Amino acid sequence: MKKTMKFWDLVALEVGMTIGAGIFIYMPIASQSAGVGTILAFVVAFAPMAIIMINVMLLGSTLPTTGGTFKYGAFLFSPKVAFLGLWAYLFGAFVGLFPLNALALASYMKGIWDGIALVPVALIILTFFYVVNLMGLKMASRVEILAVALLFIAITIYTVPGIGRIEASNLEGVFSKGIGSIIYASALLTFTYAGSNAVIELGGEVENPRRNLPLSVIFSLSVVLVCYLLMAIVSFGVGEDVMTNGTLNDVASNYLSGFLFYVFAFGGPILAIATTINATYMWGTRSLLALCKLRVFPSKLGLVNKRGTPWVLLTIIWLLSSIMLISVGESGLNLFAAFASIGGIAVIVPTMFAVFRLKNDPRLKGRAPAIVNKKWFTLIPVFGAVFSIVILLILLYQVGTDFSASFFLFFIVWEIIGIIYFAFRLRHLNRVKDNPFGRDNLSAFDD
């Protein structure tokens, strides 16, 4: 495979994949908990996610593969624990990420076309991108072409004029809602830094991946942090109370009007969230398709249509997300955000433990970046594992206390179902002598 991606190519891709729907959705939600302390929460969330992403990139540069987030945990740590993480991720996607993005997009659209019904419009959005992706990846990819460029134009339009409207008094009282609120907001906001995780799928195309993948993620996340802080300082500097409807449109309307306001509204939140839904349909089904090839899920779930689209998986995602959206309704935005964050961090936990193998397995040590040979290297996966577990526990605790214990139990029951399913699945694979997890080799990473 030709090594076409250099350091700056990686940085551009990682920044583009990280800054997106998250900032427009999660900042208003986090502000309800932490107020102006959300600014500090972005910084607090950055530190553990930087460590976690470095761990992921170390694996990606050593063993580039499709579906790596699951494979690393399954083949280098424990298939059962990795499946639990994957199962939690599916939970977060079905009952969190998809309905969250659709409902948030409908909310931003309502800021322009007042009077629209949120849930019906959100269902139309989910269905529209479901149909687009059924028509094939090529068409779906075309929807993404201008998104990143327009996003940065929108961020510039939002921040540059907004800086002149900042009132210093609005930025006081960072801890007014308590340290606990900032901690929860930080755990929630970790999701806004997770986009660069997808770059590990491209490890085989990266020039000098052992050096460039870990370094690029540090640099790109630093750029992302600066962008987030600028947007947060403007948002709260103009006035925390202006986010009354839970969107940044309310902030922008204080100093933008006419053409510039619509460029921000359409080029920023609306386009960012829309392309995120589209991309999640695209790459989410591809990752699940890779798992069907591993026999983690029955092969029939991976059936594709004549356009190469895994229509069964796509339909399941659309159906479950739509049911959740209808069941919870427009009041579920905060709950959806919590579930999405839980799924996003849970799938990473087994990966953190897989990083220990880089130092202990001679087959991997020779492929891994030079940092693996440092005496203090073990601290990196230790911190990654601790941070990911703590973030997960904070989010689960908050779901049980802020919303309802029944939602927490819903997640636990989901995980128990996953344990039972995977136990029977492994038994079946052992019976037919087709268990990919029963062999201690690295062939699973050869795509």
Image (cartoon, rainbow, N blue to C red):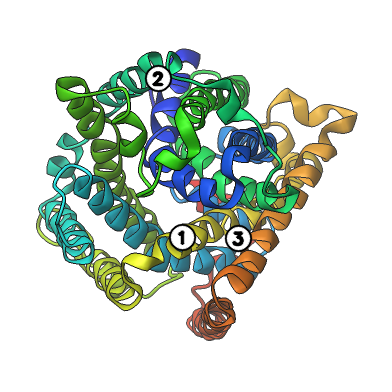
Q: Nearer the viewer, residue 344 or 394?
A: 394
Q: Amino acid at mark 3?
A: Ala
- Quickly name the residue at label 1: 334
- Left or right, residue 17 beside residue 313: right
Nearer to us: label 2 or label 1: 2
x then y, percent, for residue 277: 28, 49
Q: Quadrant of the N terminus?
A: top left
Nearer to us: label 3 or label 2: 2
- Left or right, residue 3 beside residue 131: right
Indicate whether 308 appears above or below 312.
above
Specify which label sits upstream in the sequence, 1 or 3. Answer: 3
- Quickly name the residue at label 2: 162
- Residues packed near mark 1 inside 10 Å, few (<14), some (14 to 19) or many (20 plus): many
Between marks 3 and 2, how big is the CA–CA gap? 47 Å
Residue 380 position by quadrant: top right
Nearer to us: label 1 or label 3: 1
Residue 170 position by quadrant: top right
Residue 74, numbered circle:
3
- Residues packed near mark 3 inside 10 Å, few (<14), some (14 to 19) or many (20 plus): many
Residue positioned 33% across, 73% down in the render: 324
Q: Amino acid at mark 2?
A: Gly
Indicate whether 194 appears above or below 233.
below
Between marks 2 and 1, how big is the CA–CA gap? 26 Å
Q: Amino acid at mark 1?
A: Asn
x then y, percent, for residue 66: 43, 46
Indicate whether 360 appears above or below 408.
above
Between marks 1 and 3, how big is the CA–CA gap? 31 Å
x then y, percent, for residue 345: 58, 54
- Left or right, residue 297 beside residue 105: right
x then y, percent, for residue 343: 52, 60
Q: Nearer the viewer, residue 64 or 344?
A: 344
| Secondary structure state at the residue bearing disc 2 | helix
